[in-house]
Amino acid sequence: MINDKKLLYSGMQATGTLTLGNYLGALKNWVTLNEEYECLYGVMDLHSLTVRQVPADFRKNARSLYALYVAAGLDPEKNCIYYQSHVSGHAELSWILSCFTYMGELNRMTQFKDKAAKHADNINAGLYTYPVLMAADILLYQADLVPVGADQKQHLEITRDIAQRFNSIYGDVFTIPEPYIAKAGAKIMSLQEPEKKMSKSDENANATIKLLDDRDTIIRKFKRAVTDSDTVVRYAEEKPGISNLMDIYSCVTGKTNEEIEREFAGKGYGDFKLAVGEAVADELAPLQARYAELMADKSYLDAMIKMNDEKAQYYANKTLRKVQKKVGLTERIR
Ligand code: TRP
């Protein structure tokens, strides 16, 4: 709790450009949360190091992610938006927590198995201990709530297990975080393989809408979206492509499925796809304009980064000092 508000913590990796899936599934919903919660959002750059990065591109991507958070509407004066690597407590707590995490637990992580299969030439120890660093991110701020997608649920569970284990030995040190289930938002699927989640690492450019794609590109990708051989715009399990487009259209316009079905009754898929493309392009236009302004105004973003780094460090150090003391590390001499 900070200022009588529950604390909510989340973040995204600083790799690749965010997609419409990241936006509609997470970012867009985060914007409204700071009324009710004290919110912290990290640019998770330490996690990105588990995969080999080109330093200059990586640095650009991290700043771009910061700017996208702000451009999407997260006010950096009301939300603590900061770089994970700027708060050394993440790495320090991660080490301590790794001594309270069993290899057996890490062996069960499905994301590790998937990533190890994908990057067979670089199965490094960081990839393996990735969930411990994530636990440190969350526990360092005594977060009450963590909005995560299905793919991160297992990591939140191990975070809770580690925290409970630590608390059972040393007393109530960590807040046990709960998953935050968003009231709105949808899981957005690939435009080319609608059974698969839209992913920023998809190699097929037509499968994802990037938040910085221009209007023509967006419309073209929607026109090419994979659908079925039927012609009726209707929400149904056996129509994953059309259902996904309806989810997107609904998120952006606020219309219900029934309203959408009525709107496109008697019209073909072509009209519908064009309407979805235009609606998405309209939705993203102000975000893109704001993003361009932010990237051009170095001093504003720098000031926000500095202010929020300090804020995050303050909270992180409080927890870290407590943990160090509890486990018996020698206190600093002042
Ligand atoms: N692992 C998360 C992802 O891939 C990113 C992340 C790192 C995160 N630390 C976190 C999310 C803490 C929520 C809380 O998307």
Image: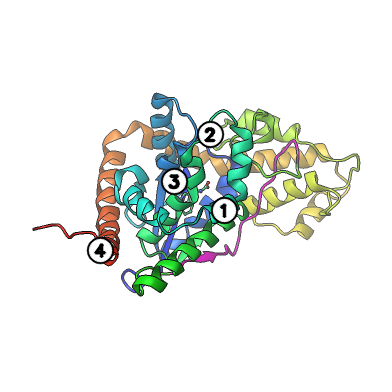
Q: From the top left corner, tell me how far across and down residue 213 is, in percent.
A: 57, 31
Mark 3: give few (<14), some (14-19) or many (20+) Cα within 10 Å.
Answer: many
Q: Which residue is mark 2?
A: 212
- Label 1, ligand 1: CB separation under 8 Å: yes
Q: Position of residue 236 (x, y in %)?
A: 84, 54
Quarter of the image with the C terminus is bottom left
**Secondary structure mostly seen in the magenta stretch:** loop
Among the 4 quarters of the image, the one containing residue 259: bottom right
Mark 4 or 2, which is nearer the eye? 4
Q: Which residue shows up at 68% across the image and 29% down it?
A: 204
Q: Earlier along the polypeptide chain: callout 3 or callout 2?
A: 3
Tell me, yes or no, whether the two marked residues, 3 and 1, touch with CB atoms within 8 Å: no
The residue that label 4 is drawn on is 328
The three-letter amino acid code for the residue at tag 1 is: Gln
Q: Earlier in the sequence, mark 4 or mark 2?
A: 2
SS at circle 4: loop
Instruction: Give the residue at mark 3.
Output: 69
Q: Is residue 164 visible?
A: yes
Callout 3: SS: helix
Please name whichever residue, 159 or 304, is drawn nearer the observer in this view of the structure: 159
How far apart are the two marked residues, 3 and 2, measured between alpha carbons? 13 Å
Q: Magenta stretch: give its range.
A: 176-193
Query: Spatial distance from mark 4 to mark 2, Cα to Cα?
Result: 49 Å
Mark 4 or mark 3: which is in front? 4
- Residue sitting at the far right: 230
Q: Quadrant of the N terminus?
A: bottom left
Closer to the camera: disc 1 or disc 4?
4
**x 43%, y 50%: residue:** 133
